[in-house]
Amino acid sequence: MGNENTPLMKRDRTTLSGNIARLVLFVLLVNSLPSCSQDKKESLKIGDSAPGFTVSDLEGNEISLTDYKGYPVILRFFLTDCKFCRADTPVFNDYYARYGNKGLKIIYIDTLGIDVNVLSAFKKELDITFPVARDTGGTTSMSYKVKALPQTIVLDPQHKIIAAILGGVSEPELNGLLSPFLSPK
């Protein structure tokens, strides 16, 4: 009596945890769907012009999308503790090493206001050589309609949206999207 470690209590906790997890998943899914009142002009689609933005890198230097006009751009909205972000960062690193000198631009963008020291440690730990930036206030992620992380937005050299990928990204995906704009080394 009163022992919290009985099998019934364990099952109740497991059921409660499962229910909470399902509820969180449901809320995320519902929030990722367009709302009935959403103006179609407000949503971004493949082929749309990418919204302009200016963010600051970890050293405080401004990065503006207009600085990259004429180049294909990968925008990666990420989390430092995200398993997908950590798992596919080597793919982005390798891709940038091969195609950065051909004009490819990659920007990792923090939208949550993570401490700059944590971001710097993340960048160093994962050996990221392209910019990691801070989207203070989340205005860039809002303009790109990012509702879940990680989200990767791929832009062609004219900064038209050619893909929006939720979750992990593979090299074959990048090849399929960017090969028309990048020649192999």
Image: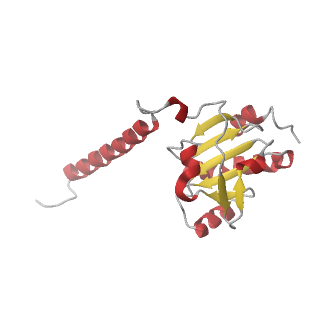
Residue 33 in the image, given as x and y percentages of width and height = 45, 34
Q: In this view, does 32 lie to the left or right of 87?
A: left
Q: Residue at x 71, y 48 (%)?
A: 65
Q: Is residue 63 above or below residue 151?
A: below
Residue visible at 71% across and 35% down in the picture: 172
For the C terminus, the quadrant is top right
The outermost residue toward the left is 1
Q: In this view, does 173 lie to the left or right of 14?
A: right
Residue 159 located left or right of residue 180: left
Q: Quadrant of the N terminus?
A: bottom left
How many numbered circles are shown?
0
To which quarter of the image does residue 183 belong? Answer: top right
* Residue in view at x 62 percent, y 43 percent: 152
Foreground of the two, 172 or 159: 159
Which of 90 and 101 lies nearest the eye of the viewer?
101
Is 45 located above or below residue 116 in the figure? above
Viewer-closest of 170 and 3: 170
Q: Where is residue 9 in the image (x, y as percent from the top left)?
A: 21, 52
- State the residue lying farthest toward the bottom: 117
Q: Given the current orientation, which residue lies at the most extreme right position?
A: 185
Q: Which residue is drawn at 54% across and 61% down?
A: 113
Residue 169: in sight, yes or no? no
The answer to whether residue 120 is left or right of residue 137 is right
Q: Could one spot residue 162 in this view of the protein?
A: yes
